[in-house]
């Protein structure tokens, strides 16, 4: 397998680099926010909106600025506290450019799938292709080109705005691009970018009503009957002989299943044999 050079990497992502350059240099938008906007757009391209970024090249800076503002609204929609989702969809310019219907409600309903996808793109793609541009913006380095190559070793860089409450850390490590595999799908983003999904990302926390004991078999039955073979691991909470189990953790096979279960809500409620089960996304203690 041939190693990939920084020239090849920058050439492949030339359009992405040009649009990012315009966001942070010409439009002077915040680097952290611009990284998230680009990660969102790259993720959208990877699912069902191909060449979305490519269509921006011929647009004016003011138009790109307006479309970026709509992307920021999408990012805000991923926060459960954000409830401003207009019936009109809220993304008129994005819809026109994509030539497909898309609305803010889509981002609420696919919240955890999108957060996971953005995190993966952010650290596997953006951290590799925008480094020199970020150096210029944050450190005043010589102005970068959107297509030419730069030294393959970069110092670790801290971008103000990270760690982010939803998307976590963004770190550019010292990296030798000559050691990267040209066939690494994370570089070319030709598949769904979920390679970094962990069991923690796919874990739900289930609670049960006191006085109405729920068995593991009942939990498995209700979720598999509704969502198919979706359970990877199910751990019922600890309870002795005289105490019922009041909670459980459930790892699902795919991050998309969590969004199917929650459907844009913080908590989903199920009923089986007169018993209630509440499900929400599991968050580790101390999680930002």
Image (cartoon, rainbow, N blue to C red):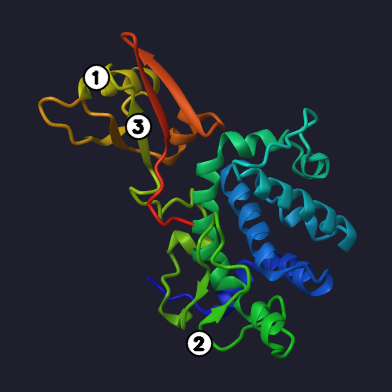
Say above or below: 77 vs 183.
above
> Rounded to the nearest whole Å, what is the CA distance between mark 2 and mark 1?
58 Å
Identify the secondary structure beneath mark 2: loop
Q: Identify the mark nearer the N-term, 2 or 3.
A: 2
Q: Earlier in the sequence, mark 2 or mark 1?
A: 2
Say few, some or many: other residues with alpha carbon within 10 Å of mark 1 (under 14 / 14 to 19 / 20 or more).
few
Q: Are marks 1 and 3 in contact (CB under 8 Å)?
A: no
Q: Nearer the viewer, residue 173 or 221?
A: 221
Residue 67 screen position, x and y as percent: 80, 52
Q: In the rendered image, which residue does mark 1 sit on?
A: 213
Location of mark 2 (residue): 153
- Crowding at mark 2 (Cα within 10 Å: few <14, some 14-19, many 20+): few
Residue depth check, mark 2 versus mark 3: number of the one nearer the observer: 3
Please provide percent x and percent y for residue 114: 55, 46
Marks 2/3: CA distance?
Answer: 46 Å
Circle 1 SS class = loop
Where disc 3 sits, the SS reads strand
Q: Which dot, 1 or 3, sits closer to the camera?
A: 1
Q: Residue furthest top?
A: 273
- In the rendered image, residue 147, in percent from the top left (x then y), is placed at 69, 77
Q: Is residue 165 left or right of residue 20?
A: left
* Residue drawn at point x = 39 percent, y = 19 percent: 226
């Amino acid at each position: 397998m041939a190693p990939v050079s920084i020239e090849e990497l920058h050439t492949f992502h030339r359009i992405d680099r040009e649009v990012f350059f315009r966001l942070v240099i010409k439009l002077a938008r915040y680097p952290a926010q611009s990284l998230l906007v680009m990660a969102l757009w790259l993720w959208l391209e990877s699912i069902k909106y191909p060449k979305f970024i490519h269509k921006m090249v011929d647009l004016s800076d003011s138009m790109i600025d307006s479309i970026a503002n709509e992307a920021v609204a999408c990012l805000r929609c991923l926060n459960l506290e954000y409830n401003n989702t207009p019936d009109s969809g809220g993304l008129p310019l994005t819809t026109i450019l994509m030539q497909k219907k898309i609305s803010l409600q889509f981002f609420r309903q696919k919240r955890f799938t999108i957060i996971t996808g953005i995190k993966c793109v952010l650290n596997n793609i953006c951290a590799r292709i925008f480094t020199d541009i970020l150096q210029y913006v944050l450190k005043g380095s010589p102005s970068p080109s959107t297509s030419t190559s730069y030294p393959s070793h970069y110092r670790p860089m801290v971008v103000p705005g990270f760690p982010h409450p939803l998307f976590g850390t963004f770190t550019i490590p010292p990296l030798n691009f000559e050691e990267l595999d040209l066939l690494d799908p994370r570089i070319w983003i030709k598949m769904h970018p979920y390679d970094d999904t962990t069991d923690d990302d796919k874990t739900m926390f289930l609670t049960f009503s006191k006085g109405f004991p729920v068995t593991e078999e009942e939990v498995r039955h209700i979720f598999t009957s509704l969502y198919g073979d979706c359970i990877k691991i199910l751990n019922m909470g600890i309870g002795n002989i005289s105490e019922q189990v009041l909670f459980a953790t459930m790892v699902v096979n795919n991050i998309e299943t969590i969004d199917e279960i929650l459907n844009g809500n913080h908590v989903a409620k199920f009923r089986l044999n007169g018993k209630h089960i509440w499900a929400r996304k599991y968050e580790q203690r101390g999680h930002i």
